[in-house]
Image: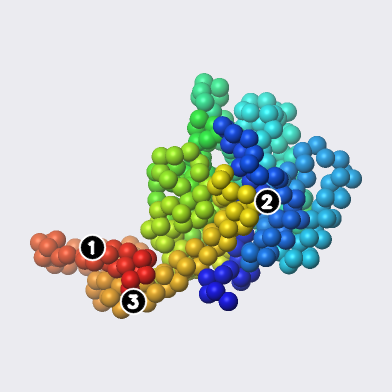
Amino acid sequence: MDPFDPTPDDRFTFGLWTVGNVGRDPFGDAVRPALAPSRIVERLAACGAWGVNLHDNDLVPFGASAAQRERIVAEFKAALAEHGLCVPMATTNLFSHPIFKDGAFSSNDPKVRAFALRKTMDGIDLGVELGAKTYVFWGGREGSETDACRDPRTALARTRDALDFLCEYVRERKYDLKFALEAKPNEPRGDIYLPTTGHMLHFISTLAHPEMVGVNPEVAHETMAGLSFVHGVAQAMEAGKLFHIDLNAQRIGRYDQDLRFGSEDLRQAFLLVRLLEGTAGGARYDGPRHFDAHAYRTEDEEGVWDFARGCMRTYRMLAQRARQFDADPEVRALTAAQDDGELDPLLAGFTPEKARRLRALEFDVEARARRGLRYERLDQLMIEHLLGFR
């Protein structure tokens, strides 16, 4: 077996909407036929994936009857059982239908907001029925092109009301489910409310049940904002709020590209995998590694599975490189603490005695300022590991 071929132990997942993407874009029609959910399950299992995620309408078409829903869900469950895949995450499509053209939870129309809540409750029921433990919220239409349409504070209050309502719904139903909020700065709206992971982390602290709610950062979305995705993920991990993650690739300054993981900015992809795998000594992320990306428009169906295998293989390759990098004696020496740790107890947790001792310390400021940190060498070592020459 190729050492970089994925296995279910890697907990890699894809969405029905990712490998099921037909290649349509604003300038051109579909280039490949839609795939049945059962076909997607079969092929993902053959590729070594662990799970498959979905929006409600990826599986059950909008407006389907109760009888149609039951038939579709039963067929999907049978496919999951046959091929050994699970559904770790589900979400609601609150952006495709024209009713959501001015938002769902933040819409000025109370009937739209009511419909969005009902649709989400139904989606939660579907996700739980399929075994999902995480429910993602991406507010793709929660934004504006002209802020004259509403006070942004009103939009935030409406969104808070919706999430508080849905948390109580989950609690009343006794579902084993947590929520993950996904940020994006723009597209399809001119500006989307709560545009970054940092915005989301603060917003969560204002909810009635913040313990139930975390974040689902996406590589492309944070990169679109010109920010370090690694830093955003690290902040979420440090806060205990990384409930899910979307992996893909993105060129800065472009529209949301959803490229194959690792196909752009290999340095950031490496640092991200290093962070998630905990090879530098930090806590390891133990949740699903979800690839929210899709194959190039140049591809037929077989190219879609090349894409899926590529996402997973690149992650595994980068994980191996991260382990080797952090085991390198020279790297370990360069990243080691710069003293014996004697001052550490003094620097955490104020007491009057600690303040007195800090004032009594002698500092050779000029000597400290002259010290080189050798980060150039450290960075070069990272490049050499990435390129396979060390």
Residue 36 shown left or right of residue 245 in the figure = right
The residue at 55%/22% (across/down) is 149
**Alpha-carbon distance for marks 2 and 3?**
40 Å
Q: Residues within 10 Å of mark 3 (few under 14, many from 20)?
A: some
The residue at 75%/66% (across/down) is 83
Residue at mark 2: 16
**Which amino acid, mark 2?**
Leu
Residue at mark 1: 376
First of labels 1, 2 by sequence position: 2
**Which amino acid, mark 1?**
Glu
**Which amino acid, mark 3?**
Asp
**Alpha-carbon distance for marks 1 and 3?**
16 Å
In front of the other: label 1 or label 2? 2
Q: Determine the secondary structure under disc 1.
A: helix
Residue 121 shown left or right of residue 137 in the figure = right
Camera sees residue 168:
no
Quarter of the picture containing the N terminus is: bottom right
First of labels 1, 3 by sequence position: 3
First of labels 2, 3 by sequence position: 2
Tell me the number on the disc at residue 328.
3
The residue at 59%/39% (across/down) is 139
Q: Residues within 10 Å of mark 1 (few under 14, many from 20)?
A: few
Find the residue positioned furthest to the top: 148
Q: How many marks?
A: 3
Q: Is residue 267 above or below residue 361?
A: above
Q: Is residue 390 above or below residue 310?
A: below
Camera sees residue 190:
yes
Q: Position of residue 369 (x, y in %)?
A: 14, 61
